[in-house]
Image: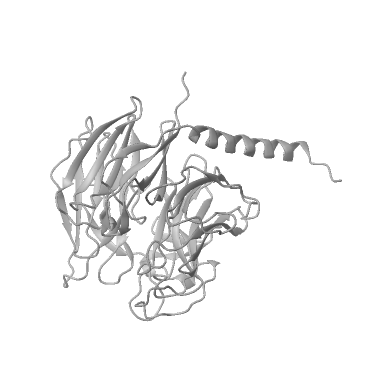
Amino acid sequence: MVKMSKTKRRIKLLIFISFLMIVGAVKGQEITTFMKDGGWCWYQDPRAIINNGKLIIGGVSGESGDIKIGIYDLVENEQLGSVVLHKNFQADDHDAPAFYIRPDGSILAVYAKHGNEPIHYYSISSPDNYLEWSEPKKFIHDYNSKNKGVTYMNLYYMENEKLLYNFFRDGPNFNPAFITSADHGETWGGETHLLTDGLEGRNRPYARYLQRDSNTIGISFTEGHPRNYGNSLFYADFKNGSFFNVDGSKIKDLADGPLSPSETGKIYKGSGIRTDGKKDSSAVNSAWTAAIAKDKNDRPILGYTLYLNNKDHRYRMASWNGKDWIDREVAFAGECLYPIESSYTGLLAFDPSDSRNVFISTNADPSTGKDLGIYNEIYSAVINNHDSIESIKWKAITSDSNYQNIRPIAVSGEGYTVLLWLGDGPWKTYTDYKVNVIGLIINRPQKQ
């Protein structure tokens, strides 16, 4: 028998303690309603932030199409209410706002319709009261066609450039692009094409963004929509106007053109099959970006979904260990949420304070794939680089639900970690839902 070293025993003990902390924090807790009547897609970030002891949540009303912001007092454990930024905007969860905390403590919210118009809308809160917001302003792109609209807002600040970036999908190219602000969101400009799909025809890469450090944005992306193409998964860093591989080697300058998938490393190889995009199914063996985080060494961790068929999706993770990508399957994701969007799953999320803590939504047994019913439940696990689906122990957070529990996100700040998801009401499609933002406070700051 091979004896386990003291170091390995200590690591395994710490992992077990971490798992017990998650389970202990969840066990016995009642699920909290943090904001009523709000929905979101998963290509806008950050959708929720913590500042001055308050949890600020953005969403789109499924009933009215209002752009809403909810405020929850984490110190007093009470909902402070919500404010409508834009009344009757559009009943579409792709329109959810993204947030940025400005230097004076005020909050910037940026949002747009789902590709219907070339306009970004933005508003700024009072620094002292997050229920008070300015009248929305507009940034209008110089696109000729009304059909060339923008969507998917993502806000990240580059410290050495002193620029706030808004990454989004543009209209003319249907590709990821950005605009910047030198005054923390008061004014905008400088639209630039960031990524290209590298395929023939009009395709739409799907990107998730990560603030790896104060001057670097990590980007996980695909060639297109899995309904149209058997996507592979790619990753690159963007900083100081240039693209880099994850190992730090330079790819090229943005001045030489947007980044194509063929110019960077492929993490997962999809089927490359093209479809007409009109069937109630997706291209077999197609990857789709879902979540992105970093470990304690600021190395990226990618979460993504894999489509096999409408009743069989998988969750996968790819972790950069400093030398190689460790890519593996971690859970069964169950069946699609509805056939027209055959690649829609319940999704997965990482804990920003400790990316080993992973949360998923599925209607299958995460470890075996056994069908557990029509509604997705939320599960948690601690996952390390050496773990795969065979070794991961998933723990149910919800069970026997009457509605879907989908699209989890975890938010950390000021010693708090909050797990949020959409539930407590019917969710049928991205334009037909009546859900609340619900969840659990997993960690609180330790008392001095």
Q: As drawn, is 294 to the left or to the right of 173? A: right
Residue name at image x 28 percent, y 65 percent: 170
Q: Is residue 402 above or below residue 245?
A: above
Residue name at image x 78 percent, y 39 percent: 5
Question: x and y percent of residue 350 in the render?
Answer: 48, 47
Q: Toward the viewer: 309 or 178?
A: 309
Question: x and y percent of residue 313 in the render?
Answer: 50, 64
Work out which residue is located at the far top of the displayed protein and give it.
448
Question: x and y percent of residue 189 in the render?
Answer: 22, 57
Asked where in the image residue 15 lies, by quadrant, the reply is top right
Q: Toward the viewer: 70 or 6?
A: 70
Question: x and y percent of residue 205 in the render?
Answer: 38, 68
Q: Toward the viewer: 265 or 439?
A: 439
Residue name at image x 45 percent, y 75 percent: 283
Q: Toward the viewer: 136 or 284?
A: 284
Q: How is the image coloured?
A: one colour
Q: As drawn, is 125 to the left or to the right of 162? A: left
